[in-house]
Amino acid sequence: AGFAYALKSGYDIIITLDGDGQHDPKEIPAFLQAASCSYDIGVIVGCRTLNYHSMPHARRLANWFMSKVVSLIARQHIPDSQCGFRLLRRQAITELKLTSTHFDLETELLLAASRRGWKIGSVPIKTIYQKQRSHICPIIDGMRFARLIFRYLFIPIYKDRRTP
């Protein structure tokens, strides 16, 4: 709904932040700066390396594993594929046919953008951990992630978009 509203309103850039207060909106200029440097970057993902060791161990391990898998399938390095702090270009979003409706949407967005020929960039960010529990269900969301990965392993690669 947020993407549809932003596109309908004519915005060229969409910024997403996780709703749990983990991200500092004061870091948005870093995303805008990175986007202004290259127009073939369709998505810029925050990379939580600035305070990586404060991330809970299980989450750090899961993020590392998922980022490796997503990077391999996307055929480009995405250091923190599960970070919800992102910049998305209008041109990239309008080309994507996303079907996921849960936490796997973040991964699908990266895989779909890369399959359309968009580069995925990243910027280092700080993350504010407040001891809140993750809403991710390891079993159910893990199965969704596995199903999405399986599906993308068998989608032919196509890069027929025009350069913005």
Image (cartoon, helix red, strand yellow):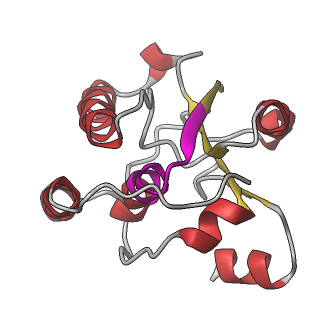
Which residues are the magenta region?
Answer: 109-121
Q: Is residue 38 visible from the viewing direction of this image?
A: yes
For residue 86: magenta? Answer: no
Is 28 displayed left or right of 102 in the figure?
Answer: right
Residue 88 in picture, x, y percent from top left: 67, 55
Residue at (30% x, 27% y) in the render: 64
Q: Measuring from the top left, give residue 133's x and y in whole percent.
A: 39, 49
Q: Work out whether 121 lies above or below 132.
A: above
Side of 96 relative to 28 (left or right): left
**Residue 50 percent location from the top left of the image:** 59, 15
Q: Residue at x 70, y 63 (%)?
A: 91
Which sits in the foreground, 64 or 98? 98
In front here: 20 or 113? 113
Seen from the viewer's position, the closer of residues 35 and 136 is 35
Q: How many marks?
A: 0
Membership of 115 in magenta stretch: yes
* Residue in the picture at 57% in, 61% down: 161
Quarter occupied by the N terminus: bottom right
Q: Nearer the viewer, residue 88 or 48?
A: 88
Residue appearing at x 24%, y 37% in the figure: 69
Q: Position of residue 125 (x, y in %)?
A: 65, 26
* Image quarter of residue 27: top right
Q: Please tell me whether residue 31 is drawn above or below residue 151 in the rendered image.
A: above
* In this view, 64 is above or below 82: above
Res. 127 visible in picture: no
- Which quadrant holds the C terminus? bottom right
